[in-house]
Image: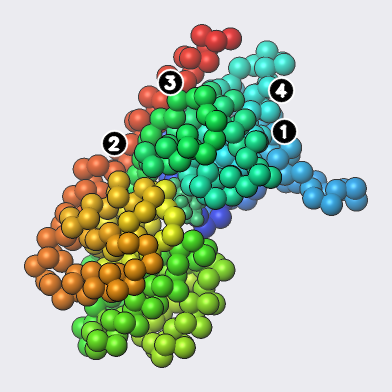
């Protein structure tokens, strides 16, 4: 199949999933056309059946806000025609699904039929999508897509609860390449960072307020106050990085915290981790937690959103009430001090990543879905 994939290219879960999906589909001999405002950050290596089309927005004195959505639409029309795309797969409803629905209409007026599939990821539904300035467009774009998927049952239900949806929504969970994400022997790195055998807590996010990165620092401070020998690694960057740095200084733990910024080989950092902390206020799936699990790292996360579908409380780590820092601290301490429990969970999380969320289990679900939606669309036109 020839598949057009549009996503946000920046550091964020939906872009990662879209890019990894495209790469996995290319390995399975599909032709993939990424259409995005810049090269998706995980698309470093090209293959002969992978293409990247950059959307360049024209500036014009009249435009206070250059119309990205329309330029994206024109690009989709152009690529659909010239590459002969079979499917347009949009990741994140705003504005990608809207552009694709319009592109499909333009193509139909020229006698070309291309189905649109939209994958909902999170804040396009749970946060920004519900804002009155977007809600009618989000609802329309979902209902007008030929197929709609959500990354968890929780997100599917949220979509039905908050929008008047007439489409079936298929749940296809996120996935992980467990051959890339596994525990590497990084003893030299661990030794350099933890010369006295300290344990390591890791948090990876885009440091948006919803990730509660400052709470990670607070939990770490409580553990250090108990004299637990532990270090904290913070990976990623975003609006809450500076507040997290301030918090670490204010609490006097800055010297034991490393802010590593945006990192691509995150699996190498996870390879020295003992616990992954995710105190998010909202999370439809929690891809970063799955990456940790694939690297044998148990997770302590908020008991919200789609996280219980990924992290089974007491098996893959622990789920704590949102914002309950006492609970987060106690559970993290338990994992760092009970070696048998830690060893058991470290094995369980890897097994879960491999058996339930491996790329080879999930990508065929997308392929089957593409086929089904294509047949449905052909029967309709
Ligand atoms: O987490 C973010 O802020 C990024 C966001 C996105 O759409 O780029 O992530 C969402 O999609 C990811 C991939 O499906 C999920 O793993 C994240 O849980 C979800 N984030 C939220 O719901 C906050």
Q: For the point 62% across and 50% down, which residue is it?
A: 38
- In the foreground, 50 or 322: 322
> Seen in the image, is 86 located left or right of residue 298?
right
Left or right of 330, for residue 34: right
User: Separation of disc 2 and disc 1 at Cα?
Assistant: 34 Å
**Residue assigned mark 3:** 371
Q: CA distance from mark 1 to mark 4?
A: 9 Å
Upstream in sequence: badge 4 or badge 2 = 4
| Quarter of the figure that contains the C terminus | top right
Relative side of 10 to 190, left or right: right
- What label does residue 361 carry, if any? 2
In the image, 268 versus 343, the foreground residue is 343
Residue labelled with disc 4: 106
- Mark 1 secondary-structure assignment: helix
How far apart are labels 3 and 2 at the CA level?
17 Å
Q: Residues within 10 Å of mark 4 (few under 14, many from 20)?
A: some
* Percent coordinates x, y for residue 245 in the rendering: 49, 81
Q: Which residue is mark 1?
A: 74
Q: Dot 2: few (<14), some (14–19), or many (≥20) neighbours within 10 Å?
A: some
User: Disc 1 to disc 3, how far (Cα)?
Assistant: 25 Å
């Amino acid at each position: 199949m020839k598949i057009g994939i549009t996503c946000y290219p920046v550091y964020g879960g939906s872009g990662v999933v879209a890019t990894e999906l495209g790469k996995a589909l290319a390995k399975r001999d599909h032709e993939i056309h990424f259409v995005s405002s810049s090269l998706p950050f995980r698309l470093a290596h090209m293959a002969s059946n992978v293409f990247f089309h950059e959307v360049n927005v024209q500036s014009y004195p009249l435009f206070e806000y250059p119309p990205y959505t329309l330029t994206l639409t024109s690009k989709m029309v152009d690529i659909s025609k010239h590459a002969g795309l079979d499917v347009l797969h949009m990741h994140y409803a705003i504005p990608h699904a809207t552009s694709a629905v319009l592109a499909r209409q333009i193509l139909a007026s020229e006698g070309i039929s291309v189905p649109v599939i939209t994958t909902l990821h999170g804040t396009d539904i749970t946060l920004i999508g519900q804002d009155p300035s977007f809600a009618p467009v989000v609802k329309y774009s979902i209902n007008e897509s030929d197929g709609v998927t959500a990354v968890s049952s929780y997100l599917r239900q949220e979509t039905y609860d908050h929008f008047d949806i007439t489409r079936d929504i298929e749940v296809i969970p996120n996935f992980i390449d467990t051959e890339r994400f596994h525990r590497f022997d990084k003893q030299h790195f661990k030794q350099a960072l933890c010369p006295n055998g300290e344990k390591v807590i890791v948090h990876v996010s885009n440091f948006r307020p919803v990730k509660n990165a400052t709470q990670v620092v607070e939990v770490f401070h409580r553990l250090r106050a108990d004299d637990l020998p532990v270090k904290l690694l913070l990976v990623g960057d975003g609006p809450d990085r500076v507040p997290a740095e301030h918090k670490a200084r204010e609490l006097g733990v800055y010297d034991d915290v490393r802010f590593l910024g945006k990192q691509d080989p995150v699996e190498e950092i996870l390879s020295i981790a003992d616990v992954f902390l995710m105190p998010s206020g909202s999370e439809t799936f929690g891809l970063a937690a799955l990456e940790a699990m694939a690297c044998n790292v148990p997770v302590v996360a908020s008991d919200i959103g789609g996280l219980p579908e990924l992290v089974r409380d007491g098996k893959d780590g622990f789920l704590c009430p949102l914002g309950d820092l006492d609970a987060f601290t106690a559970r993290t301490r338990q994992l760092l001090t009970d070696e048998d429990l830690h060893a058991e969970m470290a094995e369980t999380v890897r097994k879960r990543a491999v058996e339930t969320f491996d790329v080879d289990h999930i990508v065929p679900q997308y392929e089957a879905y593409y086929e089904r939606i294509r047949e449905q669309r052909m029967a309709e036109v």
